[in-house]
Amino acid sequence: MVQRIARTIERYHMFEPGQRVGVAVSGGADSVCLLHALVELAPRWGLRLGVLHLDHQLRGEESRQDARFVRDLAAGLGLSFLLREADIAAVAGNREQAARRARLAFFKEAIASGAAARVAVGHTRSDQAETVLYRFLRGAGTAGLAGIRPVTSDGIARPLIEIDHGEVTQFLRSRGIAWREDSSNADLAYARNRIRHRLLPQLASEWNQAIAGNLANTADWALAEEAYWKNEIDRLAAQHFTQRGEAILLRADALASLPVAAGRRLVRQAMERVKRDLLGIHFRHVSQVLDLAGLPTRSGRAQVPGLEIRRSFEWLRIAPRAGPAPLSGYRRAVTVPGTLAVPGADFAISLELIEKAETSEVHECVYNGGMGCLDWPRLSGPLELRNWEPGDRYQPSCSTGEAKIKALFQQARIPVWERYGWPVLTNRGCIVWARQFGPAAQFVANPGSRPILKIREVTVR
């Protein structure tokens, strides 16, 4: 069995030669077996081992005895021992999840401090089978069915992932190695224990004796699928994602044209990047977004936990629901010359007075959407930069008549989320310039205008 563990370590490149490895030992059979196997294998790679133990403080004296047992075990093997305590009972919510978070935090702390470069934990193939079945029952897709990763990007390695729990106990008994039984492992209040002690044995006896192995093989199959898809979705994300602050934009038509398998994974990737996890995200949420991308109405919303997902014209926007409310009310007095930052935006408005301008420069100002030129002598009184407001209307220089700015948004297909705080320049309450739509017809500069007010949109870094 130790040689099979060695092959698993090599297969997944779990450790580097000479690496410092923290072995997470609870005192249970799996982690004790892991420790003894790694002690035997350490000389092969020159590994420097240490023992990590987290006391969850959930079982009183029993927990303290576990800690003493592991400390003595480490001492007997001549290894360093690092103990942490966590008051899991004081944490609100699911205790299993709280305990898992505490363990991961402890392992990350050990790695960050230099106590270990990798942390080895004792998950077995039996744990893998339970995980796959648990996630299947909760409606997981292929990513969830990949189960427990043999090695994770944050430095967790699982050398026993191809060993059954029964083999572990047989190994320990054959060598006369003691371990401790965690009484909470028999508590059927925990979903994991119900799967382990009831559901899996029933499936094995009534349906398929090889169910545990088949589930573990499913995880191995799914893991290989996920490895392939990760590279493919990273490529598609680089091609299709447009980052706007914390939000991600995708063209709806491009998303709808992808094969369904790729579209689903791309949407999940976008959700995970924005939300930073996939907690609460289910198959129906991904389907809602794909349905939204295919809508002929070109507008709508998807209800997804923790996210604000909207369709507007050709674009889908996936943003944090808890993000800051868009700024929609500001007024700024304008000094010429000068540059005014637009609140909540990544650009500013630059105003420059030009006494002498070439005809070509005036022409460019009039027809460049990011610029504009006003006939300075026609302006009187103070200028003000403000956000557009419902009901605002004016006549752009290239238009034959007055129009509402909202109608101009529609004609220019400006997505709704880009309209918040849209800047307009006013003179005595009259709009003389609007972003992208340019100068007002009655104030636009012409070849004979002297001087001219040159308005530009500049990027703020």
Image (spheres, rainbow, N blue to C red):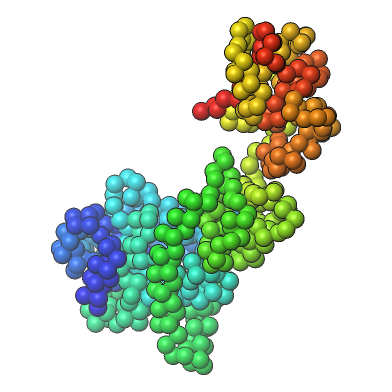
Decide which of 83, 215 is in the foreground and name it. 215
Q: Nearer the viewer, residue 454 or 52?
A: 454
Can residue 330 be seen here? The reply is: no
Looking at the figure, which quarter contains the N terminus? bottom left
| Residue 98: percent from left, percent from top | 51, 58
In percent of width and height, residue 384 lies at 73, 17
* Residue at 68% in and 28% down: 435
Q: Is residue 21 among what the camera can see?
A: yes
Please provide percent x and percent y for residue 199.
Answer: 53, 83
Please say if 395 is above or below 155.
above
Depicted 213 relative to depicted 183: above or below: below
Residue 307 image position (x, y, % from top left): 64, 51
Above or below residue 211? Residue 304 is above
Place residue 293 in its image quadrant: bottom right
Quadrant hosting residue 455: top right
Horizontal arrangement in the rendering, residue 226 relative to residue 360 (left or right): left
Which residue lies at the image location 48% right of the left edge and 79% below the top edge?
196
Q: Nearer the viewer, residue 225 or 28?
A: 225
Q: How many marks?
A: 0
Does residue 263 lie above or below 454 as drawn? below
424 to the left or right of 371: right
Which residue is drawn at the image coordinates 58% and 71% (left, top)? 139
Q: Residue at x 47, y 50 (%)?
A: 238
- Left or right placement of residue 116 versus residue 391 in this view: left
